[in-house]
Structure formats: structure tokens, C-alpha cells
Amino acid sequence: MTRRRRAAANPAVRGYGLELRPWDNELAAQMARWGERGFPYHPFDMGYLRDPARAAAAVLVHQYRSQHRHYVATEAGIAVGRVSVNLEDGEGLYFWAVHVPPEHEGRGVCRRMLAVLIEWLERAMPGRDFALISNAFAEHAHRAYTALGFTVADTRWQYDREMAEGLVTATEGQVAALAGNIRFAGGRWEMRAHLFRRRPGAAMSVE
Ligand SMILES: CC(C)(COP(=O)(O)OP(=O)(O)OC[C@H]1O[C@@H](n2cnc3c(N)ncnc32)[C@H](O)[C@@H]1OP(=O)(O)O)[C@@H](O)C(=O)NCCC(=O)NCCS
């Protein structure tokens, strides 16, 4: 068996006007051109894909069929969002890297792409809980998660290296906007984050 299993084995999933496809070079090239938000959403920005070497490496990593599956949501061939799921996390089927670029936000891409994945996972792996962790300030994301049947199961302080690095160069205004959701404790910056859980079969409001 080859060490790197082929992306073709990770099939596309469709629904709600979207096709969730595995990463490939062409989709990476589209994501390289996505608009960026900067701090405090900089960990999601995809500008690094404009470097051909980093793009090639990212495609390989995202195609590799480990416990993590990585999807790009497309609408008529246009990349409009991305999401990854860890199939073996202790908390459940665990979503991460939920990201819709600014030029496609506010028209339900997040809700629809998560709904497609949830419905597919409920068929493929019935009975599993869903989970994700989200920074407490990410309110747009929370509205989507709540609509899809997620509830806050826990709120915690956690260290996030990329956020801590971003805080070094953030403006006073950017830091002030996060008041209540960041703290300097034990010699490092921590972020307030919510653990969201969703029981299988929970009601979803998608569109
Ligand atoms: C959070 C994110 C994924 C939402 O994507 P999206 O496709 O715009 O989400 P949806 O269209 O499904 O909308 C979700 C909610 O946010 C609201 N929203 C989204 N963009 C908005 C905007 N520009 N202004 C006001 N509200 C907005 C929607 O109205 C919706 O709320 P509603 O259900 O009460 O109507 C996207 O903004 C993003 O990638 N943000 C940066 C990364 C991030 O925060 N990821 C989540 C980390 S856990």
C-alpha cells in the first residue's frame, strides 16, 4: 500500500447548493486568492497558499486520509468555504477550520456546508456526538452552530499560540474589542473559548 492514500478515496459530499470536495491544486489556487480578515481571525487566512511550495505541501497534507478529513465547499466550481473534521476525537466528530472568506459571508455558506457534512456523517457514522471549540468572540460562527443544534457544553480559558502571537502586534483597539475574552495568566495570553456539542439527530435550521 502506498504511504499516501489517494484523495479520490475521499469522496465529494453534496447538498444545499454546495459540493464539498477534497483539496486539490486548483482549489488551493482559488483559496490563495480569498480575502483575508487579519487579527483576530488571522489563523484562518489563506494567503500562505500564494507561495507555490507551501501550497503544494498544504494540498498533500489536506489530501492525506488520516483521522482528519478536509473539505472545500464549492458552489458551481467556486471555492466558498472550508471545513475539517476529526473522526476520532474523544469529544466526538470534531469540526475545525470552519472558514468562509469575507466575500462569501452572510449567505449561509457556513450553515449549509456544516449541514451537508452533519447529514453525511449521521448516515456514515450513526449515533456519534458532534463537537467543536470556538473562541468566545466569534459570534457569527456561534449563530450558525446554534442554528444547527449545537449548544455550549463548557466555557474554558485556553492558550492559543497563533492568537498569542497576533496579540503582540495587534492595535490597542483590536485588543480592546476582545475585552472579557482574553486574559494574561501564568505568563501567557489565554483566550476564552466555548466547547459546543451536538447530539446526533438534533434539529437543524439550515436555510
Ligand atoms: C464564522 C463564519 C464561518 C461564518 O460564515 P458565513 O457563511 O458568513 O455564516 P452564515 O452565512 O451561515 O451565517 C452565520 C450567522 O452569522 C451572521 N453573519 C455572517 N456574516 C455576517 C455579517 N457580515 N454581518 C452580520 N451578520 C453576519 C449571519 O446572519 C448568521 O446569523 P443568523 O443565523 O442569525 O442569520 C465566517 O464569518 C468566518 O469564516 N469567520 C472567520 C473564521 C471563524 O470565525 N471561524 C469559526 C471559528 S470556530
Image (spheres, rainbow, N blue to C red):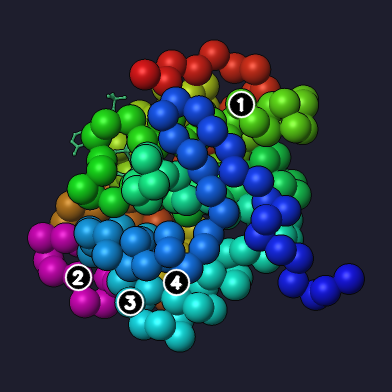
Q: Amino acid at mark 1?
A: Glu
Mark 1 lies within 8 Å of ligand 1 (Cβ measured): no
Residue at label 1? 119
At 37% from the left and 40% from the top, the residue drawn is 76
* Badge 1 vs badge 2, beta-carbon distance below 8 Å: no
* Neighbours of disc 3 within 10 Å: few (<14), some (14-19), many (20+): some
Q: Which residues are magenta?
A: 163-175
Mark 4 lies within 8 Å of ligand 1 (Cβ measured): no
Q: CA distance from mark 1 to mark 4?
A: 33 Å
- Label 2 secondary element: loop
In magenta stretch: residue 150:
no
Q: CA distance from mark 3 to mark 2?
A: 24 Å
Residue at label 2? 170
Q: Quadrant of the C terminus?
A: top left
Which of pointers 1 and 4 lies earlier in the amino acid sequence? 1
Judge by depth and name the residue closer to the eye, 99 or 181.
99
Question: Residue 65 sits in which quadrant?
Answer: bottom right
Residue 161: which disc?
A: 4
Q: CA distance from mark 1 to mark 2?
A: 39 Å
11 sits to left or right of 204: right
Residue at label 3? 50
Which of pointers 4 and 2 lies earlier in the amino acid sequence? 4
At 72% from the left and 53% from the top, the residue drawn is 9
Q: Amino acid at mark 3?
A: Arg
Answer above or below: position of 171 versus 174.
Answer: below
Which of pointers 1 and 2 lies earlier in the amino acid sequence? 1
Which of pointers 1 and 3 lies earlier in the amino acid sequence? 3
| Residue at the limit of the structure toward the left, as seen here | 173
At 89% from the left and 71% from the top, the residue drawn is 1
